[in-house]
């Protein structure tokens, strides 16, 4: 595995925390008007190096790094050499180095989910604040994909801190409106932003353009006044601090609303509570809680009655609670851009949701809505952190639930990717057999909490199609329909034949 290296700064002080060795990699798809390193833009060139070689060089300076310092991969655009960057970071991390990547967000997305979990600090360059000026400054119509990159950073597994950088060009972005837009752009990642830096545009790279015979697009633009740039930096940081305060307040309001909503639906009867508690003790999830801690846990958890159709959580809800279904059925879904509902999972007695959100501190991505009247235990974050976070049994339960969900998601993709309505219907029935099927003398009985429309949303079919297919399966003797809410599977092998 080889990468293309432009140059090295052995002990840099500004590109990431502490003292760092900075490796400037070749290649960049952008053509920023103010780029002072036009010689790094070609993808191929410079010196060929292996990840091992980067490690060797870094090890020479390691004793200077101290607690904070380490290695920075910069460019050009380092993420363009995705595989090389991944392998290098992997090696560095194995050896315990602190890592930093300086990017403009235009690399090879194929490697993002491998790279980002290995990055401690991300220096994120913000070039411009709207589509038009982004295109003018970089020559690329890439503002939307840049915003998407920012939005997706955590989905790629990034859990580090972010330094925001903006090169301020006089006459372009040296105004208050730009600073406001900057704060808006970084909102999705604001909880990870550690600092905002405004770098004054300078003209020291112009000579290189003339030497390389490349036209310089900012010819005649004066360097940015350093003091003015500093004033804008202070302004941006103040605006950012205000945004963070507002976000914190909004979060607290939401948390209290959520708490009130759950408390309003809390069960009144002590008898109900006592019965539920003794039953819940049998679940693996709660079996690890010591007897002496149980009273504390029970004091804090909220035992709620949720009516069919009510929401338990919605997309974007902060990870404040995880939910354990004691009785009833809940659907987990999201609304597609066409306004259709796509159901992912149906959860029932003993299932839980939100454990991973609390572990990863990520908001809920989907919607949880009761299909039937449900009894749900809301476990608050404080109890989760105290009693569950380190429990091996709990972590095993979350892990096995995650595997189950991956399997279900794979089955769903398989179901949706086939255009054959018989296969989709048979696949859906088999899935329901696994989730809610009850063996009876007449066959496997499915008591449905979903109407035909929801069955369609679960299987990727229109309501009319699923109704027609169920009718056909009935004619063939595979199933029996008892009203709208009960299906009895008469010939499971025949259904399996469609899917296998
Ligand atoms: S992203 Fe950086 S390296 Fe690429 S053109 Fe812009 S300033 Fe130059």
Image: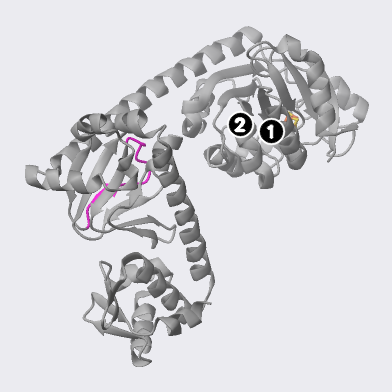
Question: Ligand 1 closer than 8 Å to the CB at disc 1?
Answer: no
Identify the disc placed on residue 105. none
Compared across the picture, whether 408 is left or right of 434 comes to right
Q: Residues within 10 Å of mark 1 (few under 14, many from 20)?
A: many
Nearer-N-terminus badge (2/1): 2
Which of 394 and 42 lies nearest the eye of the viewer? 394
Compared across the picture, whether 458 is left or right of 28 comes to left
How far across and down, in percent of the image, does residue 293 sit?
25, 30
Q: What element carries label 2?
A: loop
* Location of mark 1 (residue): 137
The answer to whether residue 177 of the structure is visible from this angle is yes
Residue sticking out furthest to the front: 291
- Which quadrant of the rendered structure holds the N terminus? top right
Seen at 71% across and 32% down, the residue is 89
How far across and down, in percent of the image, does residue 46 sit?
90, 31
Identify the disc placed on residue 128. 2
Q: Does the magenta stretch include residue 313?
A: yes
The stretch of residues the image draws in magenta is 309-320
């Amino acid at each position: 595995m080889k990468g293309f290296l432009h140059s090295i700064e052995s002990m840099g002080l500004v590109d990431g925390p502490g003292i760092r060795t900075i490796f400037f990699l070749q290649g960049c798809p952008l053509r920023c008007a103010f780029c002072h390193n036009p010689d790094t833009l070609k993808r191929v060139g410079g010196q060929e190096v292996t990840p091992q070689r980067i490690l060797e060089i870094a090890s020479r300076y390691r004793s200077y790094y101290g607690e904070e310092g380490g290695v920075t991969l910069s460019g050009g655009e380092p993420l363009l050499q995705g595989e090389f960057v991944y392998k290098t970071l992997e090696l560095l991390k194995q050896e315990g180095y602190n890592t930093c990547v300086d990017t403009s967000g235009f690399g090879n997305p194929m490697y993002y989910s491998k790279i980002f979990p290995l990055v401690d600090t991300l220096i994120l360059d913000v070039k411009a604040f709207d589509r038009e000026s982004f295109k003018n400054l970089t020559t690329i119509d890439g503002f939307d994909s840049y915003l998407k990159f920012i939005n997706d950073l955590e989905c790629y597994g990034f859990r580090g801190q972010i330094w925001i950088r903006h090169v301020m060009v006089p006459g372009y972005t040296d105004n208050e409106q730009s600073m406001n837009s900057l704060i808006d752009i970084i909102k999705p990642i604001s909880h990870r932003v550690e600092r905002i830096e405004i770098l004054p545009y300078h003209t020291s790279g112009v000579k290189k353009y003339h030497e390389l015979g490349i036209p310089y697009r900012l010819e005649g633009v004066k360097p940015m006044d350093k003091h003015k740039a500093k004033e804008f930096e202070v302004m941006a940081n103040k605006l950012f601090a205000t945004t963070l305060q507002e976000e914190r307040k909004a979060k607290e309001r939401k948390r209290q609303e959520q708490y009130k909503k759950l408390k309003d639906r809390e069960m009144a009867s002590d008898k109900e509570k006592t019965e539920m508690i003794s039953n819940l003790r049998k679940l693996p999830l709660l079996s690890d809680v010591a007897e002496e801690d149980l009273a504390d846990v029970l004091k804090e958890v909220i035992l709620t009655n949720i009516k069919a159709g009510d929401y338990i959580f919605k997309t974007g809800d902060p990870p404040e609670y995880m939910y354990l279904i004691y009785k009833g059925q809940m659907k987990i879904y999201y609304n597609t851009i066409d306004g259709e509902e796509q159901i992912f999972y149906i959860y029932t007695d003993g299932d839980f949701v939100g454990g991973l959100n609390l572990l990863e501190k990520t908001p809920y991505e989907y919607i949880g809505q009761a299909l039937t009247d449900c009894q749900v235990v809301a476990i608050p974050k404080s109890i989760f952190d105290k009693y569950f976070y380190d429990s091996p049994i709990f972590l095993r339960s979350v892990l096995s639930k995650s595997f189950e969900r991956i399997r279900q998601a794979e089955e769903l993709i398989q179901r949706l990717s086939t255009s054959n309505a018989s296969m989709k219907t048979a696949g859906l029935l088999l899935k329901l057999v696994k989730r809610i099927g009850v063996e009876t003398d007449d066959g496997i009985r499915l008591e449905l909490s979903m109407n035909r429309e929801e069955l369609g949303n679960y299987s990727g079919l229109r309501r009319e199609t699923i109704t027609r297919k169920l009718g056909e399966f009935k004619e063939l003797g595979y199933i029996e329909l008892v009203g709208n809410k009960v299906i009895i599977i008469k010939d499971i092998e025949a259904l399996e034949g469609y899917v296998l």
